[in-house]
Image: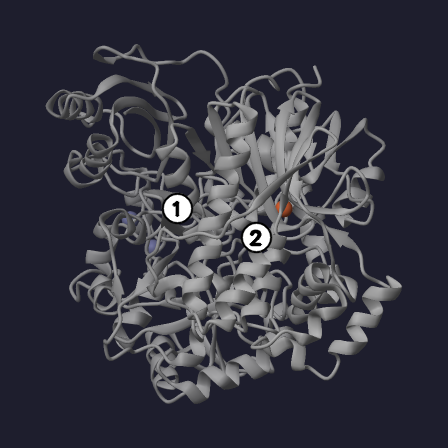
Amino acid sequence: MIRKLKIVIRGVVQGVGFRPFIFRLAKELNVNGWIINSSQGVFIEAEAERKTLEQFLNKIESDRPKNSYIQSFEQTWLDAEGFTDFEIRESLEAGSKTALVLPDISTCNDCLEEIFDPKNRRYLYPFTNCTNCGPRFSIIADLPYDRRNTTMGEFEMCPECMTEYTDPLNRRFHAEPTACPECGPQVTLTDNRGNILSEKHEAVHAAAEAIKKGSIIALKGIGGYQLLCDASNSDTVNTLRQRKRRSQKPFALMFPGTDTVITECEVSDPEYRLLTSVEAPIVLLKRKKNVQSKVAYECIYGNPYLGIMLPYSPLHHILMKELGIPVVATSGNISEEPICITEADAYGKLGDIADFFLVHNRKILRHVDDSIVRIAAGKEVMIRRARGFAPLPVVLKGIENFTVLAAGAHLKNTIAVNKGSNVFISQHIGDLENIESINAFKKVITDIENFYELKPEMVICDEHPDYISTKFSETLSLPLHKVQHHYAHVLSCMAENELDESVLGVSWDGTGYGSDGTIWGGEFIIPNGLKFKRAGYFKTFRLPGGEAAIHDVWKIGLSLLYDVYGKDVFKLQNIPLLKKKEAKTIKQLLDKNINSPVTSSCGRLFDGISAVIGINQQANFEAQAAMDLEFAADDYKTNDYFASTIDKINDAFVFNWHGIIKSIVADLAAGEKPGLISAKFHNTLAEVIVQIADKLHFEKVLLTGGCFMNKLLLERAVQRLKEEGYKVYTQQRIPAGDGGISLGQMKYASYLK
Ligand code: ZN
Ligand code: ZN
Ligand code: FE
């Protein structure tokens, strides 16, 4: 099938033969479409078979003209239009000339060479950068992007730097954050109270030595502090977990180079591209089996994936070269607060966690977390969108004539503000559960508004009355519109894929406020502008104990079983959760219907089934049980699935999971392996999508919501829908989880005209 790939490349790509290069490449590969230059970058639309387009993508990066640089590289898969030729179109200078704030860019190869060249004046200098690389978004106070408007403004350039800065032929011509050891920022190593221990390269060296000896280091990075320690040292990793009060959530890792990554993990071509891209995100990579791992069990527990990034700033490069071993590189924050960006904050909050602090005197103006991306169903899937990607806009038609603030959701919040058709989606802000995050939320809104001198005329928020983002929106005295959570997920996916309303939206997540006041989460949605139809949903069940059930997932398991078997439930064999002491008490809670809200949540069904099978009965963090269920299926390849029933209730198709529970109980009684049961369960959900799609007669099906960050579910659903002749759409540049809600809210505004 012919697909279209939309590519936006920003960076120095003009005047170096970039357009002719793309033209030749397109001709060589028989790709049709066009390329155009504008002040905002190079835009390409390319059509061919998927495999050819993947080749095209890889070759753009590997074979591009020697003097072309790429500061960001965005790609979106769309439906083909039927181009018959490839052409270079006239440069586009009309339209918005908004100067864009670029994301922070990883160190380029030229700068790297200088840093490790003993004869170069920037030898081992951790703040080396040039026009093609370095910090941007994290240091810009205001537009235009001039040195005086960045936190580098307080460093006066030395004559040599000034010569480079003013020479149009130099790589550092107007490189705003440029610096050298003579005139720029410097690093310092301190103890956990800020007492200076060593300076400059000696500080980096000492930090590396301390890490090797088992210390925890707080490092002031690009978009905030990170906590680093030796990933192979179980004791240190455990200490870090205790001090950070982080039970079992996997830690992100930084590896010294691609060689070490390839030794540990399976790395496909697109994964390699991502890992080494200018965005340099954390990439989730499948761990190889039977290798002597350098990563301690305590870093990730049973997770078959490692979240790995490569060094992306000179400071990281120099430190990792000294170390030569993988390190834990987790956010420098406590619990779920935003990462620390100032020394005051860092010593105050991380002083009890880190033994040493590797700090410097270049200020960070805003927190920008490390982004997380994975490859699933052959495409990039954004899990957390921040450094390297934010605040680049997503183009959305229909909102050109007014300015909207989209306040996002509650968990994994992002916000969005538009200028014309450019939608600026903020970096990941986090869960709005503590005062620090709420302050960050407000600051980010002011921040984006100030940058682009925007005054929103309208605000869009979630329908949930208790969300902080909703309550905040209500205080703004602007026209306010509320969008149902799962509809916003669907709209977000439509916006990204440039789809109109003739689609079936499958919107599955852990929780969202339903239009009937109950908790939704397993929804089939037909969009219709400002309204939508809830065409299907999961048969509801109860969450005994309410919110706490996201941790006590065995209670959800019990609730599911009780729903199916009634009072006979305790006669069932081989189900460990029924032996819990509290099980009878929870049954009474259900009988009396005390604190047991009703939900149609897909995520909670995953949790409950994970508990029923005995894979995870007590989650340490939200969705852990669901993730463990996914991982358990890892080694089981099967096409088997459980029979399921679709009931028709009041014009909606209701997925009745009772039959599945009975099949699982039978499998357990027969001694079937938990992993195989899990694989069959995943397959069953894909069949449920197909069955409901078959009843609703849409050619296009889109999959969105946090549940589709489950790679197994996503890939199986995409495969089965395609086999049945459906066109399938998924989120690409924007997270399927609640980080994507703000874009959906923005899309809603486009219907408001
Ligand atoms: Zn550079
Ligand atoms: Zn200098
Ligand atoms: Fe959601």
Q: Crowding near pointer 2: few (<14 within 10 Å), some, many (20+)? A: some
Q: Tell me the SS state at disc 1.
A: helix
Residue 696 appears at what percent x and percent y? 56, 26
Tell me if residue 616 comes above or below residue 122 in the rendering: below
Image quadrant where residue 485 sits: top right
Q: Is residue 289 left or right of residue 496?
A: left
Q: Residue at x 44, y 50 (%)?
A: 683
Q: Is residue 374 left or right of residue 100?
A: left
Kindly identify the amino acid type of the residue bearing the numbered disc 2.
Leu
In front of the other: 387 or 183: 387
Residue 67 appears at what percent x and percent y? 18, 36
Tell me if residue 175 comes above or below residue 697 in the rendering: below
In front of the other: 508 or 7: 508
Tell me if residue 54 comes above or below residue 421 in the rendering: below
Q: Crowding near pointer 1: few (<14 within 10 Å), some, many (20+)? A: some
Q: Residue at x 39, y 39 (%)?
A: 720
Query: Can you say which quadrant of the picture contains the N terminus?
Result: top left
Kindly identify the amino acid type of the residue bearing the numbered disc 1.
Glu
Disc 1 and disc 2 in contact, CB within 8 angstroms: no
Query: Can you say which quadrant of the picture contains the C terminus?
Result: top right
Q: Is residue 694 left or right of residue 622?
A: left
Q: Which mark is residue 715?
A: 1
* The image quadrant in which ligand 2 is located: bottom left
Q: Tell me the SS state at disc 2.
A: loop
Residue 472 appears at what percent x and percent y? 80, 44
Residue on which the image places disc 2: 365
